[in-house]
Image (cartoon, helix red, strand yellow):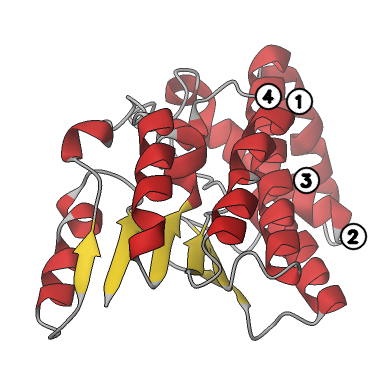
Amino acid sequence: MQLVYLPLDERPCNYAYPVRIADLVPDVQVLTPPIEWMGKKKTPGNIEKLWGFLAEKAPKCNAAVLSLDLLLYGGIVPSRLHHDTAEEVKNRLYQLKKIKKQNPQLKLYAFNLITRLPSYNSDDEEPDYYEYYGRDIFLYSCITDRIQRNIATDEEKKEYKELQEKIPAQYLTDYLDRRKVNEQVNEVAIDLVKEGIIDFLIIPLDDCNPYGFSAITQRKLASFVRKYQLWDQVYIHPGADE
């Protein structure tokens, strides 16, 4: 049995350890792309070569385990930094239709994170402005969610207005636009499950919080899963990216 595996990123916990575990199983071979195509932290992987690798190996394999963050953005950290439009990213994702059509025997198991929402100031794995406004964006996110749920206090509503004035508009727009792309891509991925292209999909929440943009997105995506009755094929849950 052969599997093609496109990991989340180049870290050993994602790139190497799953392959080592699979090596313990007789008659299972896992095919992974060269490490030099995987990128490194903020540097995205070679998306074109990664898709080419998948297309090349698919006819020989029984199943594929795919990080959509890798195939669409070049990795988990680049997924938080890119400036691609939703249409550009969706068109990459639609390539799975061609791969499935050409390889009907191939089971597609995919996963794609809901963009995380760190609660602290740091641009180590986030846009540069998160070094100065990360905590504020997090608080703004939490209060936004609480307002939508009609549970925000008067004090929180006051803080919300203060945060709107404090966070530069261009930074907030950049951050929210990227989250919208992530949300739309996850919606398309759910549609691909409904169409029978993706056989099983996991949408984990990375560094999540009970309130905030991640929770808002989770509720929206869960409504799609509920609408299409795909609970056996789409799992949405908190969990580390590894």
Mark 4 vs mark 2, CA separation in Å: 23 Å
Q: Is mark 1 on a helix, strand or loop?
A: helix
Residue type at mark 1? Gln
Q: Residue 209: name its quadrant.
A: bottom right
Residue beneath label 2, please? Answer: 150
Report how far apart the C-alphas of labels 1 and 2 lie in the structure: 19 Å
Q: Mark 4 points at which residue?
A: 172
Image quadrant assignment for residue 210? bottom right
Mark 4 or mark 2: name the one nearer the start of the chain.
Answer: 2
Residue lying at 22% horizontally and 65% vertically, measured from the top left: 30
Local packing at callout 2 (Cα closer than 10 Å; few below 14, some 14-19, many 20+) is few
Real-space CA distance between mark 4 and mark 1, rounded to the nearest whole angstrom: 9 Å
Q: What residue type is labelled 2?
A: Asn
Q: Which residue type carries mark 3?
A: Thr
Q: Which residue is drawn at 9% across and 81% down?
A: 24
Going from the N terminus, do you reach mark 1 or mark 3 first? 3
User: Which mark is nearer the camera, 3 or 4?
Assistant: 4
Task: Please tell me whether mark 3 sits on a helix, a strand or a loop.
Answer: helix
| Quadrant of the image containing the C terminus | bottom left
**Relative image position of residue 100 (x, y in whole percent):** 58, 60
Q: What element carries label 4?
A: helix
Task: Name the one closer to the observer, 163 or 11.
Answer: 11
Q: How far apart are marks 2 and 3 (CA)?
A: 10 Å
| Residue 224 location (% of width, % of height) | 81, 67
Q: Image height check: is 160 above or below 12?
A: above
Which residue corresponds to mark 1?
Answer: 164
Quadrant holding the N terminus: bottom left
Q: Mark 3 points at which residue?
A: 144
Which circle's residue, 1 or 2, is located before the other in the chain? 2
Q: Do the residues labelled 2 and 3 touch (CB within 8 Å)?
A: no
Which amino acid, by three-letter code, is at mark 4?
Answer: Leu
